[in-house]
Amino acid sequence: MSEITEISGMAALAICESILLALNDRNILPESEILGILNDAAAGHETAAESGKNKVQHLAVAELIRKIVSAGNSVRRT
């Protein structure tokens, strides 16, 4: 991956996490919905990995999303 691609990916991740936090903070989406969105995204990449195209990348993305969910980074848990 090029440095520009990595930087773009990191920026996109930070923006998405901030949006999810804001949606939760303003009571627009509950924690369960946000976790559902993240789990759906991970499952989508796991399914895409089964196609054989870019398998390693898809599995890596799914793993990262699962780590975000388990760490609680995208919701402010009280």
Image: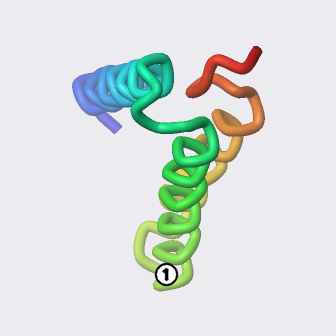
Q: Position of residue 54 (x, y in %)?
A: 43, 67
Residue at 76% x, 36% y is 70
Q: Position of residue 8 (x, y in %)?
A: 26, 27
Q: Is residue 6 visible?
A: no
In this rendering, would 58 be left or right of 9? right
Pick the front one: 7 or 23: 23
Q: Which secondary structure lies at badge 1?
A: loop
In this rendering, would 40 be left or right of 66? left
Pick the front one: 8 or 77: 77
Mark 1 is surrounded, within 10 Å at the Cα level, by few (under 14), some (14 to 19) or many (20 or more) other residues, namely: few
Residue at 61% x, 36% y is 31
Residue at 41% x, 76% y is 53
Residue at 35% x, 38% y is 1
**Is the image coloured rainbow, by chain, by secondary structure, or in one colour?**
rainbow
Q: Position of residue 40 (x, y in %)?
A: 53, 61
Residue on which disc 1 sits? 52
